[in-house]
């Protein structure tokens, strides 16, 4: 039996808190309006609802419309919504995001669609997501089949629009043309998913192949890459042998002891960690850190007699930033230990 709007209204009363509809044939458009108690909406594997309008759903928090042939989604007056999943449809634009509250924690999955810019099949950057200050998860990836068939999300450019998204925990840019900007990703993001399927590269090409190339040594599993290890080694490579007075100040003011008490502390700690590791790559990272701190301690011996009131006042001003550096160093060491156990 083919379902329609009349059938839907007859079977789903306005007092429902959840609507769950799947594996049905549907004819026409669907309007879900004035359901004051509705909190969760699940529409999955429905053939097919080309247009869905959600209006005046004041308690709606989660919306999943998965594999329904959807091309157009309209959201109006749904102020509580914090999770939208429209995976595996044919959605062509992001207009439905305009009415979504930008300050709320937000989880968005728009993978396997047909999204483009203002013109049909034009490229689209990540700028629309920069407004979501508490974005927690973003999946914009493509399947290899969709890209070969010319039905895919045309995201391109840089990841810089996700800078300062400090709630971001998940990101998937598989088979897109996003090709740069890893350094802009927030530290809250420990992993990134980025497939670069061979068939797509052979027939159409993937801009994200450049990101996969940069992360190839940090594969965690499948198409998942370890950003913590990438950041750690990138920091070491950029700073190795370049310890200066500013860095020495940061390293030593980040602890709550006097300068004299801090000397050698990190070197001893790193030596202890190195002795417990078995993976040679992890050991190499730790040894580089040790070299940096040995140099820092050598410079400190020259600085002890030069510290004056003006310097101490300057240190006080940046104390909060330096404490964050300490926490970052601790997380780096912890991640190295985790990586060693994984290998």
Image: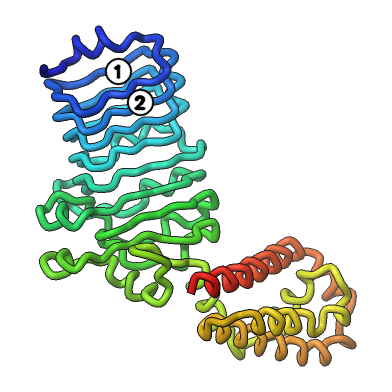
Mark-to-mark CA distance, 1 and 2: 10 Å
- Looking at the image, residue 102 lies above or below residue 342: above
Choose between 309 and 339: the one closer to the eye: 339
Choose between 126 and 254: the one closer to the eye: 254
Q: Is residue 156 left or right of residue 216?
A: left
Question: Residue drawn 39% across and 65% down?
Answer: 221
Q: Which mark is residue 92?
A: none
Tell me if I can see residue 81 in this picture.
yes
Where is residue 209 drawn, in percent x and y?
A: 27, 70
Residue 13, image quadrant: top left
Q: Which mark is residue 41?
A: 2
Question: Residue drawn 14% across and 24% down?
Answer: 25
Q: Secondary structure at mark 2?
A: strand
Tell me if I can see residue 231 in this picture.
no
- Discs 1, 2 touching: Cβ within 8 Å: yes
Question: Residue drawn 35% across and 53% down?
Answer: 126
């Amino acid at each position: 039996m083919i379902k329609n709007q009349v059938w839907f209204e007859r079977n789903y009363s306005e007092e429902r808190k959840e609507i769950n509809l799947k594996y049905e044939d549907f004819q026409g458009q669907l309007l879900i309006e004035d359901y004051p108690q509705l909190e969760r909406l699940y529409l999955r594997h429905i053939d097919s609802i080309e247009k869905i309008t959600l209006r005046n759903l004041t308690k709606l928090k989660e919306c999943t419309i998965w594999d329904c042939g959807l091309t157009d989604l309209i959201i109006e007056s749904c102020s509580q919504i914090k999770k939208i999943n429209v995976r595996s449809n044919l959605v062509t634009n992001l207009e439905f995001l305009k009415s979504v509250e930008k300050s709320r924690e937000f989880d968005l999955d728009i993978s396997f669609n047909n999204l483009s810019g203002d013109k049909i099949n034009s490229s689209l950057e990540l700028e629309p997501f920069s407004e979501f200050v508490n974005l927690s998860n973003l999946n914009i990836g493509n399947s290899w089949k969709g890209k070969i068939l010319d039905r895919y999300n045309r995201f391109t450019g840089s990841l810089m629009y996700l800078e300062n998204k400090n709630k971001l925990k998940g990101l998937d840019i598989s088979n897109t043309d996003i090709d740069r900007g890893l350094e802009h990703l927030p530290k809250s993001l420990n992993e990134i998913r980025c497939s670069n399927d061979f068939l797509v590269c052979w027939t159409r090409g993937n801009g994200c192949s450049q990101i996969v190339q940069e992360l190839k040594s940090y594969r965690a599993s499948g198409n998942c890459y370890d950003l913590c290890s990438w950041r750690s080694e990138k920091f070491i490579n950029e700073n190795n042998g370049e310890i200066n007075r500013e860095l020495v100040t940061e390293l030593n003011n980040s602890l709550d002891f006097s300068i004299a008490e801090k000397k050698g502390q990190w070197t001893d700690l790193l030596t202890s960690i190195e002795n417990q590791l078995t993976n040679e790559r992890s050991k190499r990272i730790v040894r580089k850190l040790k070299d940096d701190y040995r140099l820092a301690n050598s410079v400190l011996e020259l600085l002890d007699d030069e510290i004056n009131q003006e310097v101490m006042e300057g240190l006080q001003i940046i104390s909060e930033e330096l404490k964050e550096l300490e926490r970052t160093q601790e997380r780096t060491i912890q991640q190295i230990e985790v990586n060693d156990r994984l290998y």
